[in-house]
Image (cartoon, grey):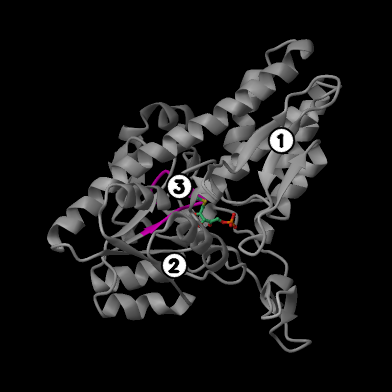
Amino acid sequence: MKVNGKPTRTIWVDEMPGAGPGRVGIIDQTRLPHEFVTVSLTDLDEAAHAIKAMLVRGAPLIGATAAYGLALAIHGDASDARLAAAYETLHATRPTAVNLRWALDEMMKTLAPLPEAAREAAAWSRAGAIADEDVEICRQIGLNGLSLIREIAARKNGAPVNILTHCNAGWLATVDWGTATSPIYHAFEDGIPLHVWVDETRPRNQGAALTAWELNNHGVPHAVVVDNTGGHLMQHGMVDLVIVGTDRTTANGDVCNKIGTYLKALAAHDNGVPFYVALPSPTIDFTLTSGFDIPIEERGGEEITDVWGRTPSGEITTVRVTPDGSPVVNYAFDVTPARLVTGLITEKGIVAADREAIARLFAERAAAAA
Ligand code: MRU
């Protein structure tokens, strides 16, 4: 998507390895929406830090960054031992998004059989392919989701289609296009009148900071609402469709996504609002058949006690919002059971959140995990 009119991805190659190790460019997402800052990653530790500290975040982008991290890690030592250690370091950065493991496994499948001397070039090439594949997958998700938005628009006689989304499953969470936002961008480009309700998504405010920044840059009509507003909007007929992303969806269609997603699904169910999940197939974990087996990341308490932002005088700072001494608990994700999900918007089409239906659509991956 475009930043200040310039086509931009969330991750790119700044420099291929030569005498030096190569450099991978990323957007430091911890500085948005107030500053647009790019950073160059040059080694394994920097790549691992970028994922752990959430300079990059969102399941597909975490996967692509880990792939490049492995390529950076083997400069000067592409031995089996180095590969295994780099895999472990990157895999340990964040527990919930399964694209991380998927991308690392894809890299290992390519690299492990090769002689050491051929591994570095192959790693850069496979990491680049993973990034390019993600762009194409997300574009297809957008085209498949567009049909849903078109159908709703046809019933609304020119009134805007109101779509609610949670967290940031936008282009910043992927390499480009986004998952939940891809249908929105495609519909907007298609001239369909629409309006997006953006959940702020405490504690890190990925909705308020990132999704709103994206939509604003792109000129898509939207409004940021606090996390508890969705139920009220749905009760008053102000939401036609919910589209969220996911960090890991199990073989039976249980959806793990940013904390608070489950409550939106309950409200949608109670109010007869369709609740769709947009996801690339690498986000499906065919090894699990219950969402309750997904490891839920618990993050630092400072994400709850402190809020980061810009003061009226322009200073960018952090302020404390809880009393000193009050304990906090910070679960980053929750699980929405498949029964509350209207459908999954994938690159291969829209499918029911149901074990057999998912396995039919992605037969090869389902069989490989069986
Ligand atoms: O903790 P984050 O910001 O990495 O979590 C990202 C999300 O939960 C997104 O909402 C998402 O849908 C998964 S990425 C498309």
For marks 2 and 1, the one nearer the N-term is 1
Q: Please give the residue where the numbered disc 1 appears in the rendered image.
A: 24
Q: Is residue 356 visible?
A: no
For marks 3 and 1, the one nearer the N-term is 1
Q: Please give the residue where the numbered disc 2 appears in the rendered image.
A: 198
Q: In this image, 253 relative to 16: left or right? A: left
Q: Residue furthest front?
A: 5
For marks 2 and 3, the one nearer the N-term is 2
Q: Is residue 365 visible?
A: yes
Three-letter amino acid code at the position of disc 1: Val
- Residue 22: in magenta span: no
Range of magenta residues: 243-253
Helix, strand or loop for disc 3: strand
Three-letter amino acid code at the position of disc 3: Thr
How many C-alpha atoms fall within 10 Å of the one at disc 1: few (<14), some, or many (≥20)? many
- In this rendering, which labeled residue sits more in front, label 3 or label 1? 1
Q: Residue furthest bottom?
A: 323
Q: Please give the residue where the numbered disc 3 appears in the rendered image.
A: 250
